[in-house]
Every structure is written in structure tokens, then in C-alpha cells.
Amino acid sequence: MARPVRVPYLIWATGEYGSANHGRSNATVALRLAQKLLRDGYMDVRVCTPRGRVLQADELDELRPAKERDAMAKGQQRGNREAKKPKKDKAKVIAAAPSRKDAAWQPDFGPGKKK
């Protein structure tokens, strides 16, 4: 006795001259076939997922892989990095201005020994 083949994605479509039923093994192939049936003029195209959810023709984008579905233009993408803290404002020091410090005692190093 032949063992039945399990097909997780079932596609069925109703057209002007009848209906078509197909089974496919993965979501990408099922999506491609459903879009082809829509282009060929079938009016009611549905896809049943492995979890039993029935997708109508306008919900077929849910079968696309996450990479394609979530791809956005560069300007719309947001990173997940934490925002940096703003830098502390520093007072500008002008090198030409004289120092305002009081003259403090500084040790006097006398002339060094000569050999």
C-alpha cells in the first residue's frame, strides 16, 4: 500500500470554467502558484496553511518570507541601538588669553651639575 504524501499548503481556485485544486510543499511555491492562478483569471483563489488558516487572495502576502515582507527603504529603517547621551558642553579656552590663575610658589631647580 502506498504511503500518502503530506502536502502542507493546499491551493484551490474557482474560475469561469471550473475549479482547480493543488498541493505544494512550501510557502514560496504555494504563493507563486496562487499568484499565477490569479493572473490566469481565476476569481476565488485561496490557500490553506499547515495550521489550517485559509488565506484569501488579498491576504497572500502573509506567505512571503519575513525578509521580503519586512524590507523597507533605507530612510524608513530604524536601528535598535540605544541612543547616545548628549555630550557635555565644554567652555572654550582661548589660547591667546592670559591665565587668570594666581602665581603660586614653584620650586627653583638651580643650575645642574656639569661633568
Image (spheres, grey):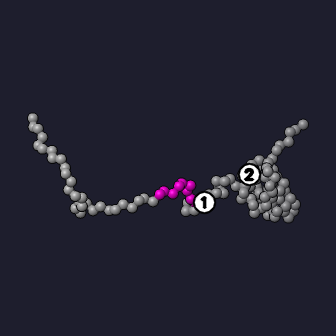
Residue 80 is drawn in which quadrant? bottom right
Q: Position of residue 59 (x, y in %)?
A: 75, 61
Horizontally, residue 6 falls left or right of residue 88, namely right
| Prevailing SS of the magenta stretch | loop
Residue furthest left in the image: 115
Taking the image as drawn, is residue 96 in sight? no
Residue 86 is drawn in which quadrant? bottom left
Taking the image as drawn, is residue 28 in sight? yes
Residue furthest top in the image: 115
Residue displayed at 72% across by 55% down: 63
Question: 45 or 65: which is nearer to us?
Answer: 65
Residue displayed at 87% across by 62% down: 17
Label 1: which residue?
A: 72
Region in magenta: 77-85
Q: Quadrant of the C terminus?
A: top left
Residue 83 - label? none
Q: Position of residue 103 (x, y in %)?
A: 20, 56
Residue 40 is drawn in which quadrant? bottom right
Q: Position of residue 26 (x, y in %)?
A: 74, 49
Three-letter code for the amino acid on which mark 1 is drawn: Met
Please determine whether, in this image, residue 110 is positioned above or below residue 17. above
Three-letter code for the amino acid on which mark 2 is drawn: Ala
